[in-house]
Image (cartoon, helix red, strand yellow):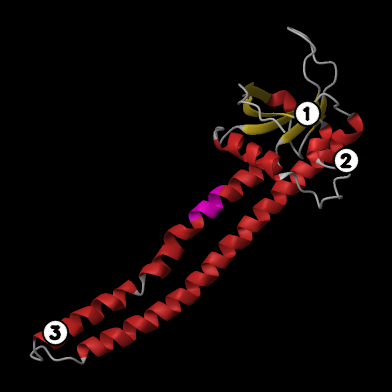
Amino acid sequence: MVKACHELRVSLDSIRSLGPPDAGALGGTLPADIAEELLTQARSADERAALVIRFVVPDADAACADAIAARVHTHFARAAQRHALQIRDIFRFARVSTAVGLLCVVLLLACAQAIPEDAGKLMNGVRESLNIFAWVAMWRPAELWLYAHLPERHWRCLALRLARATVSVEPPPRGPGAVLSVRLPRFSPGARAAGCSRSPARSAAGA
């Protein structure tokens, strides 16, 4: 069965738009605008499709292709790691918030139970307010446990897909119907370009 691929195409004025050829010069990071464009295009891709990143630059250079591919993989691998750390922090805050919330529930409910039923309208209102505040204290822990980590998981999965993507650097076609003369693919570990059928490219972004 042929595995579907989704192509992300980014057109640049020069290969220097991606930064210095040495992948370690900037700690393996991409310029913010290029990284944002790749994320934007990847969001619209089928989640089951493998990603293929194609940089179209007039001065495509074989000597820089591997460094650029390594930089793309490193950039998004580090982004995925940051999101993973953020998820861990959210659950740590959830544990602390739960402990604080439960303590508030116990104290406030105890105070509410100490007020007798026939204490009068004012004290009955205080008792009901204490009951409400007790359960409101658990809203934030519940939000952290149930929902706060979901956006971070989404961005982590997207970054991991980009970190595993196939990356190529090539010059633009010379004219109508021209065949590209230089194609410098960089495959992520375990990827097989031969087993992919590419889906139509998204709109390109200028540098």
Q: To which quarter of the image does residue 62 belong?
A: top right
Q: To which quarter of the image does residue 127 belong?
A: bottom left
Spot occupied by residue 72 in the image (x, y as percentages of width and height): 75, 42
Element carrying mark 3: helix
Against 34, is 195 above or below?
above
**Residue 21 image label:** 2
Residue 3 left/right relative to 107 = right
Against 30, is 110 above or below?
below
| Residues at marks 2 and 3 touching, judged by CB atoms closer than 8 Å | no
Spot occupied by residue 6 in the image (x, y as percentages of width and height): 62, 28
**Residue 13 image label:** 1
Element carrying mark 2: loop
**Alpha carbon distance from label 2 to label 3:** 73 Å
**Residue 124 image label:** 3
The three-letter amino acid code for the residue at tag 1 is Asp
Looking at the image, is mark 1 or mark 2 nearer the viewer? 1
Along the line of sight, which residue is nearer the eye, 56 or 189?
56
Along the line of sight, which residue is nearer the eye, 121 or 73?
121
